[in-house]
Amino acid sequence: MLLKTARNLYSRLMEIPPRGMSCGRDVSIQRPRRILNPACIRIGERTQIRRGALIEPILAYAGVHYAPAIEIGSDVYIGPDLYLACIGRVVIGEGSVLSEHVFLNDSSHGFDPTAGLIMEQKLSSAGGISIGKHCFLGLRVAVLPGVILGDHCIVGVNSVVTHSFPAYSMIAGSPARLVKRYLPEEKRWVKVN
């Protein structure tokens, strides 16, 4: 009994969010993890982030200062090995599920051949990322800058989302394209030609 209690306590301690992060009740962030600038991150209640997450709101890069913000809603499940970086704003809506190895980044390196080393060039962004409520992102999905996914979107395995989609969209591919739409009034998914 004592051993079981000690294991439970250790397990809970290994999942406590880092200091400075704004979190609701019952948030679990498994170790190992790497979370930078936690004061830029807000998480709702009962959200779970599995092991291996790298969450990086970028405050400064190549001499430029940014004001990043990451907002993760309540009842979100994020699978192992998330990569989330931003110089602007990334929002993940309540009740959403992100599978393993999901990549979210609202910026990219400069690629000016005359501006020196790529890693020393300023970051650029086409806008923040917003994942709606109750969305599902499959294994190894990448969401690029400026993307807005409406509520209840489903993104297929290995998809690269390069532009926005409205609510009730099922998308897949690289680049992702619309494959089905959900019709709430008929309660069914229909193929899109």
Image: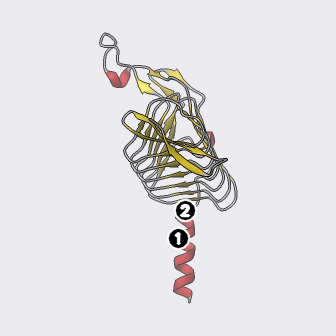
User: Along the horizontal axis of the image, is 31 left or right of 94?
Assistant: left
Q: Residue at x 54, y 79 (%)?
A: 6
Q: Amino acid at mark 1?
A: Ser
In the image, residue 140 lies at what x, y percent? 39, 47
Q: Amino acid at mark 2?
A: Glu
Assess whether mark 1 and mark 2 are in contact (beta carbons under 8 angstroms): yes
In the image, residue 63 lies at what x, y percent? 48, 20
Q: Nearer the viewer, residue 95 or 112?
A: 95
Residue at the limit of the structure toward the top, as seen here: 114
Residue at the limit of the structure toward the bottom, as seen here: 1
Position of the C terminus by quadrant: top left
Give the secondary structure at mark 1: helix
In the image, residue 144 lies at what x, y percent? 46, 32
User: Along the horizontal axis of the image, is 150 left or right of 78?
Assistant: right
Say which residue label 2 marks: 15
Q: Nearer the viewer, residue 28 or 9?
A: 28
| Badge number at residue 52 | none
Q: Residue at x 43, y 46 (%)?
A: 156
Q: Nearer the viewer, residue 192 or 135?
A: 192
Q: Residues within 10 Å of mark 2 (few under 14, many from 20)?
A: many
Q: Residues within 10 Å of mark 1 (few under 14, many from 20)?
A: few
Q: Is residue 56 above or below residue 100?
A: above
User: How is the protein colored in the picture?
Assistant: secondary structure
- CA distance for labels 2 and 1: 7 Å
Q: Nearer the viewer, residue 172 or 160?
A: 172
Say which residue label 1 marks: 11
Q: Residue at x 56, y 40 (%)?
A: 37
Give the secondary structure at mark 2: loop
